[in-house]
Image (cartoon, grey):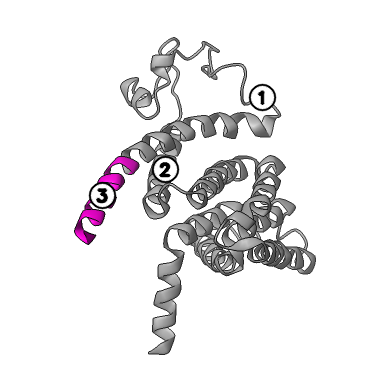
Amino acid sequence: MIQDEIGMMDALMYFIQPVAFVLGASVGSFLNVVIHRLPRGESVVSPGSHCPECGSPIRAYDNIPLVSWLALFGLCRDCGAAISSRYFFIELATAVITMGIASKYGISLQSAIYLCLAWGLVAATMIDINHQIIPDEISIGALLIGMALAPFLPIGFWNAFMGALMGGGIFFILAIIYPGGMGGGDIKLMAAIGAILGWKMAFLTILLGSSLGAVAGLAMMVFTGKSRKTRIPFGPFLATGAIISILWGSQIAMAYMRSISG
């Protein structure tokens, strides 16, 4: 009986993983539109996808996630202009992240909200890198969704509330102590992450994000000669920390507890 159940779960996983990968690649294709248009105040719905150089509409068969970019060798079919490899890698990264979350949490409300957060974090990362802003549509939207759905999730409302308060509060205090070192977008993004992950995973996200940011800052000074006062976007490190927390947070916490208990 137990083996039958395990077999059914394995069969379900074989179904979930490819579907999640295709879903993630499709969402990644849409996120490319969001990343390009949202900071410019343009609609993410219309007009349809088009070549940024010649303006020619992209045909449906040239808009297949991952496949079309490879088939066209990263070039526009009409004018031959190069299409950034960023489009391909965002689709690929979103597909892999989606498959990872779906594999761990299955078909559930928790999985759905984690996916929405991860997708928003992918968009926020690229927008922050390109424009040094994190749109409220992403951060505030995720915060409101997290608080609204928290009573129906394992973390519960108060855990979500404390996560949002701690995540946003720590960064708000840092922004007061070090003016210019922490942007309002980072504060709101961390509050949203806390609302969805709860205070424990929010704390882990901050630790991971800060560690990654410190390593990146050090590498930048060593390899580019820039000073430590050079401002680098912090949103991407928070986003990476949050996704790591979603996928491996419990394992990291258990490994830490084992290390301190001897």
Relative depth, front residue between 124 and 11: 11
Would you say 141 lies left or right of 255 here?
right
Q: Residue at x 70, y 48 (%)?
A: 144
Asked if one can make out residue 68 in the rendered structure from this viewpoint, the answer is: yes
Secondary element under disc 1, as helix, strand or loop, is loop
Quarter residue 169 falls in: bottom right
Please state the horizontal and vertical placement of residue 237, each as a whole percent of the image: 54, 56
Please state the horizontal and vertical placement of residue 75, each as a whole percent of the image: 40, 20
Asked whether the beta carbons under mark 2 and mark 3 sit within 8 Å of each other, the answer is: no
Relative depth, front residue between 25 and 159: 159
Q: Is residue 10 magenta?
A: yes
Going from N to C along the chain, the mark reached first, 1 or 3, is 3
Amino acid on which the number 3 mark rests in the picture: Met
| Distance from the alpha carbon under mark 1 to that under mark 3 | 43 Å
Secondary element under disc 3, as helix, strand or loop, is helix
Would you say 203 lies left or right of 185 here?
left
| Distance from the alpha carbon under mark 1 to that under mark 2 | 24 Å
Please state the horizontal and vertical placement of residue 128, each as a whole percent of the image: 62, 45
Residue located beneath label 1 in the image: 43
Q: Nearer the viewer, mark 1 or mark 3?
A: 3
Please state the horizontal and vertical placement of residue 59, each as a whole percent of the image: 44, 12
The image quadrant where one finds the N terminus is bottom left
Residue located beneath label 3 in the image: 8
Q: Which labelled disc corresponds to residue 93?
A: 2
Q: Which span of residues is magenta-colored?
A: 1-16
Amino acid on which the number 2 mark rests in the picture: Ala
Asked whether the beta carbons under mark 1 and mark 2 sit within 8 Å of each other, the answer is: no
Would you say 157 lies left or right of 86 here?
right
Vertical arrangement, residue 48 with respect to residue 87, above or below: above
